[in-house]
Amino acid sequence: MEDTTRIDRDMMFSDGVAVIFGGSGGIGSEICRKMVEAGSDIIFTYRNNSDKANSLSRSLAQAGRVADAFPVAIEDEDQVTDFFGEVIKKHKRIHTIINATGSAIPMVFISELDSKKWREVMNNDVNGFFNIVHASLPHMRENGGSYVVISTTGLKRWPTRDVLSVAPKAAIDALVTGIAKEEGRFGIRANTVALGLIDAGLFQRLRGSDYSELYVEAAIKNSALKRLGAASEVADSVVFFASNRANFITGQTLVLDGGYSL
């Protein structure tokens, strides 16, 4: 009898493509690069910046892998459903779905939060992730696979004025736990990578305004490793969870914050 468990461990990824939502962002683009370097074909989505997405797609394709870019607004259920239909039609199988999306948010106290902004962010992030899961689960059940979601260390240690990041990710993390518990019998795994301050993406755009230098210095001082994280370190963790090296890991959170939440 063929030892399929041994074969899976010898392969970095199962057959098919990885789908990265938010792949054109500062962290998402590094995840795309690392997945390609590790030997996976990828499909990634972007929101508005087609020039950046197409440039990334061309750059990654030079490595000889599929690296196609699609514009997708994840809060639009029809767009997400149509997107998965196109990917499955062309590539037959998805082995991993990675969610690296996130809304551009203001840093505010809960008492100052605009109710319209609250509903907008919750719709984009929470309902958006549900749309991804709802559209993809029937396919993932056929062959198994992995969900990997970028979360926040704010669920371990409350970050001042960051409710619009923490609250939606709390709901998303609950969905991830539910997927791990309910869908494991179909060979589906689901895990999260909880980020502290990473010197990339949204953090770089907010640094100097919402993230003052005093805030950044205090965060570094209060971490065990006394530095910010890098996008490449996030990507390495995501690649591990997506790979067959993590085949017996599900429902877990890897806290990537340099010891800030200790």
Image (cartoon, rainbow, N blue to C red):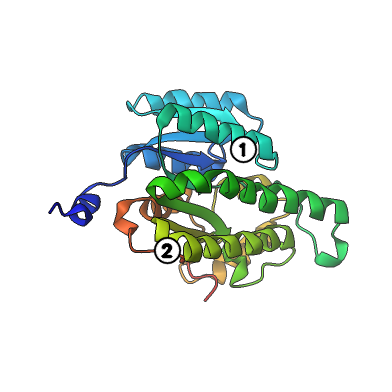
Q: Residue at x 48, y 66 (%)?
A: 181
Instruction: Report the amino acid beneath label 1.
Output: Val
Answer with the quarter of the image where residue 213 lies: bottom right
How would you rate the neighbour count of disc 1 (Cα within 10 Å): few for under 14, some for 14-19, many for 20 or more? many
Q: CA distance from mark 1 to mark 2?
A: 25 Å
Disc 1 marks which residue? 80
Residue 55 drawn above or below residue 94: above
Local SS, label 1? helix
Q: Nearer the viewer, residue 146 or 38?
A: 146
Q: Nearer the viewer, residue 100 or 230?
A: 100
Q: Nearer the viewer, residue 194 or 44?
A: 44
Instruction: Report the amino acid beneath label 2.
Output: Thr
Q: Residue at x 42, y 35 (%)?
A: 42
Disc 2 marks which residue? 250
Q: Is residue 227 visible?
A: no
On the rendered image, what quadrant is the N terminus found in?
bottom left
The spot of residue 92 in percent (x, y) is 40, 33
